[in-house]
Image (tube, rainbow, N blue to C red):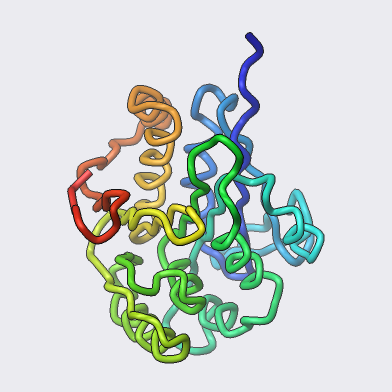
């Protein structure tokens, strides 16, 4: 029997992203099954995107209308964060460009139909990347998390979004990651805490889509102590059962 094709993962970058927010999940999915289980593609609006630490990353595909029109080929979307200390810092600036391709892509992915015969798609925010989802209303009526230093800012933003969209405000939880279950489009919404928490969230996804053994082996390969019991996972009957993963 021929091996199954790798799960396609799209990594969404913007100027001023945090390097570990990107590299943690990228390394996790690249190490899983010796790179045979997942294929990560990097997209950005510019050919070269510079992180807040000054690292230059070359994109694999352009972030444009063509990519948005063909989003269905991707099973997982990862949205890193970056500095969020005021209205002129990278995340705040990017979040306010709601009509740009960056925010359009996140919103479009959150509303994609499920892939035929497979598990739900996954939308994962890393660190302050949660601010983008909170701005778009992806977290409306759900639980979420972000970097501990941005809890208050995210809480304010999701309340503002709830008023604007006439929805229910999200609740921000302190956790390594939060799996808030699937939304109305059958997309699983996961958010991670700050920076290194993205590795724990990515390993959790490897566990969900592959097996716990695959996640354990990946963590061993990375020489990383997986903090798998520090995430909050909601059951599929959203809002009824809450359990520490």
Residue 225 in the figure: left or right of residue 126: left
Residue for point 67% across, 58% down: 56
In this rendering, is residue 223 above or below 93?
above
Name the spot of residue 79 as percent of width and height, x first.
53, 60
Instruction: Farthest residue to the top: give it.
Output: 1
Numbered circles on residues, count: 0
Name the spot of residue 211 as percent of width and height, x first.
38, 26
Residue for point 48% across, 79% down: 135
Name the spot of residue 47 as percent of width and height, x first.
79, 60
Quadrant in which the N terminus is drawn: top right
Name the spot of residue 233 as percent of width and height, x first.
27, 50
Query: Could you say which quadrant of the image residue 49 lies in?
Result: bottom right
Residue 203 in the figure: left or right of residue 135: left
Residue for point 60% across, 57% down: 112
Quadrant in which the C terminus is drawn: top left
Residue 210 in the figure: left or right of residue 11: left
Q: Which of 104 and 224 is in front in this view?
A: 104
Q: Nearer the viewer, residue 138 or 125?
A: 138
Query: Could you say which quadrant of the image residue 62 lies in?
Result: bottom right
Residue for point 21% across, 48% down: 230
């Amino acid at each position: 029997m021929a091996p199954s094709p790798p799960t396609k993962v799209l990594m969404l970058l913007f100027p001023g992203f945090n390097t570990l927010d990107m590299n943690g999940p990228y390394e996790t999915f690249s190490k899983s099954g010796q790179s045979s289980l997942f294929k990560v593609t990097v997209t950005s609006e510019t050919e070269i995107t510079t992180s807040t630490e000054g690292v230059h990353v070359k994109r694999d595909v352009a972030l444009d209308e063509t990519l948005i029109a063909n989003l269905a080929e991707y099973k997982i979307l990862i949205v890193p964060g970056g500095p969020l200390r005021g209205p002129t810092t990278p995340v705040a600036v990017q979040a306010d460009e709601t009509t740009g391709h960056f925010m359009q892509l996140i919103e479009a992915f959150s509303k994609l139909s499920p892939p035929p015969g497979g598990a739900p798609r996954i939308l994962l925010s890393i660190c302050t990347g949660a601010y983008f989802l909170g701005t778009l209303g992806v977290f409306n009526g759900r639980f979420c998390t972000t970097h501990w230093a941005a809890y208050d800012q995210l809480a304010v933003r999701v309340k503002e979004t709830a008023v604007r969209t006439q929805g229910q405000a999200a609740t921000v939880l302190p956790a390594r990651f939060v799996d808030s279950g699937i939304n109305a489009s059958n997309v699983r919404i996961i958010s991670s805490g700050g920076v290194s928490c993205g590795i724990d969230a990515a390993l959790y996804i490897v566990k969900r889509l592959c097996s716990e053994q695959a996640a354990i082996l990946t963590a061993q390969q990375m020489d990383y102590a997986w903090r798998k019991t520090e995430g909050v996972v909601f059951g599929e009957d959203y809002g009824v059962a809450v359990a520490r993963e």
